[in-house]
Image (spheres, rainbow, N blue to C red):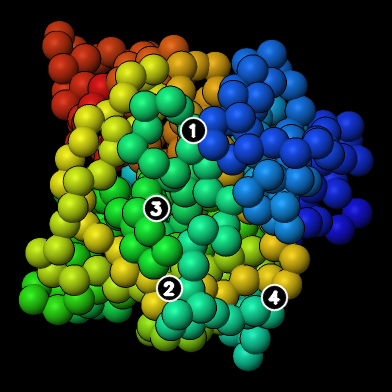
Amino acid sequence: MPQPHDIPSFLKEVERIGELRRIGVPVSKHLEITEIADRVVKQGGPALVFDRVRENPEVPVAIGLFGSHNRLALALHDKPENIAKRITDLIGTRPPNSLVGMAKMGLQMLPTISSLGIKRPKDGPCKEVILKGDDVDLSELPVLTCWPDDGGPFVTLPMVFTHNPNTKRRNVGMYRVQVFDKNTTGMHWQIHKVGAQHQREAGAQPIEAAVCLGGDPCLPFCALAPLPEEIDEMIFAGFLRGKPVEMVKCETIDVEVPADCEYVIEGTIQPGENRPEGPFGDHTGYYTPVEDYPVFRVKCITRRKRPIYPATIVGIPPMEDGYLGKAVGEIFLPLIKTQLPELVDMNLPVEATFHHLCIVSIKKRYPNHAYKAMHALWGLGQLMFS
């Protein structure tokens, strides 16, 4: 059976296993789609495709794609426990003595897998339609307004591709994108995120970025994954899917993006240009307040001829992100154990939206050993919020 490699093929497989419902009546992208999706995911329901979005009738919206164990395993091309075992088999039992050592070990071992790497075709489905200049209009995308007091419509499954201006190393992060007008958005990368680091290192120069939607269903997970900075998210995607990711160069910026995306939004962020962003109904059930964030100016939009707009909604658990968060904890436990060999198991409860509470069991060897483990975990990415 062929593995899904993009959103259309993924939806076919989700429909085959009986976990997809299509809505053929007109539904608004302003609050209505997300209200329905919120109720369905809390009831353990199927993924949804809204085929007739009232404001954008030609572009279906797919939501709740990762909202079950079956759908997530299909998106990741395997069950999380099997992926964790593959990682364990890769790294063996030799713990490096630093985070840098862990990254170097990963770099040394991952290329031994023939499935890894990047392919670079001349073209891809994401470039079937190319819009530049005055033809750029973000209102043609069915970007959802999720909650009544949100500051506007937000792109909620964006994979943001940037490069370190000095090393040229790629990063892919998931930072929400508030649409301000036809060619301007916010870029919600917090100061500790790699995208913000790239902007700081660019200094007085603008930074280029591409916001991607769709592609292989494992890509959003890779954008969220707590990988060492030295490991390319697209190499990890190749590891998950068992074959290289095909990447094409953007039209107006020097950034590569997955060829199978539904949409690619190309643009730049000028140094010092910020504006208020938010509020936004967030994972905790509260709105994050209005704060200044960088402005993303769109130069070009490329897309498929018949695109599908992927989206999610975040809010009070249980939500779709619960399945993603649980998978992160399970899949990356072997890597954390390379830094903390005393670690037995770890649980990131859905009720605490994952990074706000971390329950750990260890093999205690001396008094106050728990303090050592706790401080080590605080040094690992989002766990600093636990």
Disc 1/disc 2 C-alpha distance (Å)? 24 Å
Task: Say how many tags the image has.
Answer: 4
**Which residue does the numbered mark 3 point to in the structure image?**
179
**Which residue does the numbered mark 2 point to in the structure image?**
266
Residue 366 appears in the figure: yes
Callout 4–callout 1 Cβ contact below 8 Å: no
* Residue occupying the point 44% across, 12% down: 351
Which is more toward the observer, 135 or 177?
135
Q: Secondary structure at mark 2?
A: strand
Identify the mark nearer the N-term, 4 or 1: 4
Identify the mark nearer the N-term, 2 or 4: 4
**Which residue does the numbered mark 1 point to in the structure image?**
146
Q: Amino acid at mark 3?
A: Val
Disc 2/disc 4 C-alpha distance (Å)? 16 Å
Q: Is residue 341 above or below residue 111?
A: above
Disc 3/disc 4 C-alpha distance (Å)? 24 Å
Q: Is residue 350 above or below residue 180?
A: above
Query: How busy is the neighbourhood of tag 1: few (under 14 within 10 Å), some, or many (20 plus)?
Result: many
Residue 180, how many percent across, how many down? 35, 54
Which is more toward the observer, 93 or 372?
372
**Which residue does the numbered mark 4 point to in the structure image?**
125
Identify the mark nearer the N-term, 3 or 1: 1
Query: How busy is the neighbourhood of tag 2: few (under 14 within 10 Å), some, or many (20 plus)?
Result: many
Q: Amino acid at mark 1?
A: Cys
